[in-house]
Amino acid sequence: MRVDIVTIFPQFFDVLDISLLGKARANGIVDLRVHDLRDATHDRHRTVDDTPYGGGAGMVMRPEPWGETLDGILGAGGASVALGDASTPGDASTDDLASTASDAPTACDASTPLIVFPSPAGNVFTQKTARRYAQEEHIVFGCGRYEGIDQRVFDWAGTRARVELVSLGDYVLNGGEVAVMAMIEAFGRLIPGVVGNPDSLVEESHEGGLLEYPSYTKPAQWRGYDVPDILLSGHHANIAKWRHEQQVERTKRIRPDLYEAWAAAQD
Ligand SMILES: N#Cc1c(N)n[nH]c1-c1ccc2c(Cl)cn(Cc3cccnc3)c2c1
């Protein structure tokens, strides 16, 4: 899998060299490339922003550096696909991603790169999104700053690739870098060969729609707290049953929204 990141803070992603993803890069499982948007500027101050048309506070990211950088990543020709607007149906629902939505790509396939722009106005990133991204051959992440990126970048990019605006959640960040770091970790660990023991991914929170069960390790007693007896019984079937019951109880108590969706899917 190839991953390109466009940002004005390339050093922000240096940390990806020390994580599991660093090993995946070294092993050739992931080809990760970081691009400094300012390298596509041609003025003395390497300007990437300007005042917004129509007035308003803050600055908007200029389209030219984005177009030049994405041209370099996608190749001069690049895929030409007929698309709706940049947004695509989110993965937040429990339904499979609707591939027939009016704003979904109408003439492209998995070999067409996916360009993901973090945005407060994007669809919320979920584990379902992470699973989908882990299947992609080439993802380009466009990290914006200031008040956002000129809309024409999304419109033009949508003629060259599949484009998604994605939000990390309903809170406000200062730019896209933190969101991209989180998304790369979330889908990167799902890529075969990145995590040593893939079995460890199966019973995590949000896999299967339930939160994970509580975990314990040695010592059996700690500051007056004991490990549940069932976990010391060696009875694997009973342990599995107890763990599932814990998952259901925790999900119902902590995330009733997830519980309702999970319960509906059991019927
Ligand atoms: N993903 C996500 C996400 C999230 N969950 N919160 N904020 C963001 C996010 C993503 C991209 C940008 C770009 Cl480009 C500029 N800003 C700053 C900003 C803040 C408020 C209103 N407009 C722009 C971004 C914030």
Image (tube, rainbow, N blue to C red):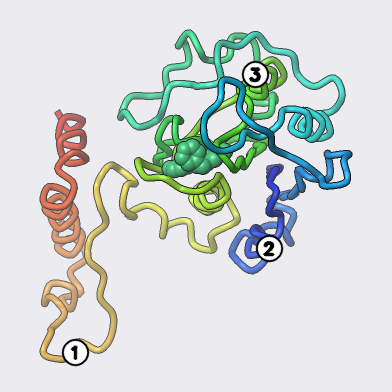
**Residue neighbourhood size for the residue with mark 3, other residues' Cα within 10 Å, grouped as few (<14), some (14–19), many (≥20):** many
Is 204 left, or right, of 224 in this rendering?
Answer: right
* Residue 49 at x, y percent in the picture: 69, 37
Q: If you read the primary sequence from the N terminus, does the residue marked by circle 3 or circle 1 appear first?
A: 3
Q: CA distance from mark 3 to mark 1?
A: 56 Å
Is 96 left, or right, of 174 in this rendering?
Answer: left
* Residue 28 at x, y percent in the picture: 74, 54
Residue 131 appears anywhere in the view: no
> Height in image: 52 above or below 26?
above
* Residue 33 at x, y percent in the picture: 75, 49
* Residue 124 at x, y percent in the picture: 40, 35
Q: Nearer the viewer, mark 1 or mark 2?
A: 2
Q: Does mark 3's beta carbon lie closer than 8 Å to ligand 1?
A: no
SS class, disc 3: loop
Q: If you read the primary sequence from the N terminus, does the residue marked by circle 2 or circle 3 appear first?
A: 2
SS class, disc 2: helix
Judging depth in this view, the residue of 56 and 3 nearest the camera is 56
Q: Tell me, yes or no, whether the two marked residues, 3 and 1, touch with CB atoms within 8 Å.
A: no
Disc 2 residue type (three-letter): Asp
Q: If you read the primary sequence from the N terminus, does the residue marked by circle 1 or circle 2 appear first?
A: 2
Disc 3 residue type (three-letter): Gly
Which disc number belongs to residue 250? none
Where is residue 127, by image quadrant?
A: top left
Report the residue marked by disc 2.
14
SS class, disc 1: strand
Q: CA distance from mark 1 to mark 2?
A: 38 Å
Report the residue marked by disc 3.
158
Is 216 left, or right, of 113 in this rendering?
Answer: left
Q: Tell me, yes or no, whether the two marked residues, 1 and 2, touch with CB atoms within 8 Å.
A: no
The residue located at (83%, 39%) in the rendering is: 40
**Residue neighbourhood size for the residue with mark 1, other residues' Cα within 10 Å, grouped as few (<14), some (14–19), many (≥20):** few
Report the residue marked by disc 1.
222
